[in-house]
Amino acid sequence: MAKDTEKLIRQLSLISFLMAERRPVTALEIKEAVEGYAGMNEDAFARRFYADRAELEALGIELKVDKPAEGYFDAENYTLPPENFYLSAIEFSDQELGGLRTALSLLDGEFAYAEPLRLALQQLSWGHPSPLAAPEERSVSLAITATAGGRDLSQRLAKIETAIFRRKTIVFDYYTMGRDAEETRRVDPYQLLFRGGRFYLIGRARERDDIRVFRLSRIRGKVAYSSKSEHDFGQPKDFDPRVYATRADWQLGEPVGSARVWVSSRVDWLVERHFGHVGKVIPAAEADDAPAEDGIVFETPYADERLLISWVLGLGERARILGPAELVESVTERVRLVVERHTGSLDVAPAVVGWAGENGAREPAPVEEASRDAPREAPIRPERLARLMTLTGILVQAAREARKLDVAELCQALQTTEAELREDIDVLNIVNFGGGSYVLYAEVQGDQIEVDPEPYGDSFARPARLLPLEAKALIAAIDLLGEHLPEGSLASARTKIVAALGEDPAGGGLQMTSARGDDSDVARVVSGAVAERRLLEIDYYKENEDEFVSRRIEPYQLLNGREGWYVHSFDPEREAARSFRLDRIRSVTLLDERFEPRPGIEPDVTGWPSTGEVPASRAVRVWVAPERARWAREDRSVIEELDDGAVVVELHYAGDDWLAREILKEAGDAAVLEPEDARVAVLEAAEALAGAVRG
């Protein structure tokens, strides 16, 4: 029998024995009664018993130890208080269970933590209708999910997840984009962060003795442990993972200064909604250096000058950097560069000989990222102990009800193969309460499982507490979806779960973010309208035209995409389906009027929500300077490599305003090559912005 299996039998038998006795027992009694310890000498038993206790404690199953005054190991007494093993009862409403059910159906197979999520929901639904069945009708669609994406990324994610839990220092080769260099890093991993559709690692870089953020897709090769020690580090008490989940892009690093940005009244509400939490907002009328009395002045610390400038330039004439002086000078120079590179013709280096891009001659291998077309993998598998505890409860309950279980259905519920299920049942048939009393006896008979009731088996007829990975997966799924489920409030379910667990698992190594900015207030109203089939009236900001419009819409679904969350709807006035970004809805009103659902309004999440390319779009060729080419290779569709290191990428766009903003965001490091009318549109936008900056 494998050592891991022997350990699982010991640990489960230890739990069973202590639960059955319900009294303090000595180490000697445990050695004699618990499966796996008998036959060991005293030293071996002491080592194994201590290791098993430590592992169970790390999983949240803590034995109570009564130590005598003399401190002799042999005289210690051990108990397992029920509250240290059983899951506290949680009274979910039907709406909350419906929300949890929808969360799983949306994420199942497309979520790195899908398997521990299923086990968590199996435990939480004990005594309730199972939330594991898919909802009859989809009211939410996801284009962006927290998949690892690809075999290599899946392996890295799984290794890092384990290293965070075990507090193991890891070693890996990392490609640093800013220096265009690959270096070996030794890192104490503190937290995983899912942000903007990608996974990041936050940890202390040993070489710099400082906390750094690493993008998983830039890790090269395998992730390895740096030592064979059981633990390598302790996470500092002052480390707050929420800081990294809520920072703006320009704040991911050590601050180098604080910027003052004027924002016009057209978009000041939008900036406050997105970024009010990462800076200070004062009315423009109270600022001496504001160019107008309308709008706000936004003060924000920054670590990356270019990313801050990129954000401000993307707002066009509706925003302007006021200080510090060196930042203003940098903005002026970058806008001048955009104008220069769109005036007349742009001379570019010849293409690399033999490079054929999409024709396949010598195209560089793309950086691996999550893709909807990639095989769905489940890199984060739950601890086998968690699966065995869940299976035990299911089998004991079946024995109490004198019913047989279907093998295929049980494999589906636990996401295991039939071979794994048979192995798990063989293990559980050995787990004992001591003294020859076993937890259960189960036998696979064809396509069914028959379970014989055993003495004391009722001790497992209650759900066990969620182990750390299960709890983490559950809270991560809730945080990823936020307030975007019409079936019920996940926020209230989250509050109840955290109360039952006694702590918030989000601080245990994983933070999830999905929406850009806080759209929760709008989302709650829209979700209610979707569920009740009621019309909505929205005051919507059309960024391309820089105008506000009022719309009466029939809301059908919420869906997420590369830019944030949307409500997919039907616009009766235009007799067409439309999708509106939630964070662009300035205000929303729930109307009393109801509507009958129309056929064929479902969104295609494999289209623009996941690709960013809108229907009926035009293609434009864009030159990217050598110093920014490596970023373009990572995030854009490169169609040509040039001799000087620059690249040509292809963008798809539906409006000149959107294209101009995208080029301005590149801060002078990109220029449209063709078509000519697109170059002119960008030039006009840049000249207008240059005039505003000078003014």
Image (spheres, helix red, strand yellow):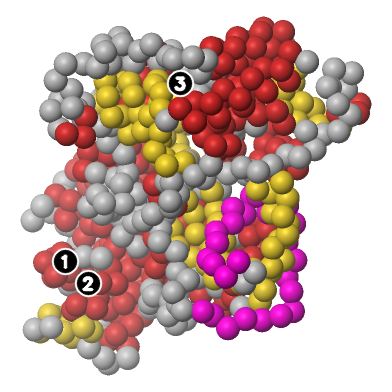
Q: Which residue is mark 3?
A: 670
Q: Quadrant for residue 568, please give it.
A: bottom right
Element carrying mark 2? helix
From this view, report whether residue 609 is shown above or below residue 314.
below
Q: Quadrant of the C terminus?
A: top right
- Which segment is the magenta one? 574-598
Q: Quadrant for residue 456, please give it.
A: bottom left
Q: Is mark 1 in CB contact (under 8 Å) with mark 2?
A: yes
Element carrying mark 1? loop
From this view, report whether residue 300 is shown above or below residue 383.
above
* Residue at (16, 16) in percent of width and height: 353
Disc 3 versus disc 2: nearer the observer = 3
- Residue 586 belongs to magenta span: yes
- Distance CA(mark 1)–CA(mark 2): 6 Å
Q: Earlier in the sequence, mark 1 or mark 3?
A: 1
- Distance CA(mark 3)–CA(mark 2): 53 Å
- Amino acid type of the residue tagged 2 in the rendering: Cys
Q: Is mark 3 in CB contact (under 8 Å) with mark 2?
A: no
Q: Which residue is mark 2?
A: 411
Q: Which residue is mark 1?
A: 417
- Residue 181 belongs to magenta span: no
Image spot of residue 581 (x, y percent): 59, 53
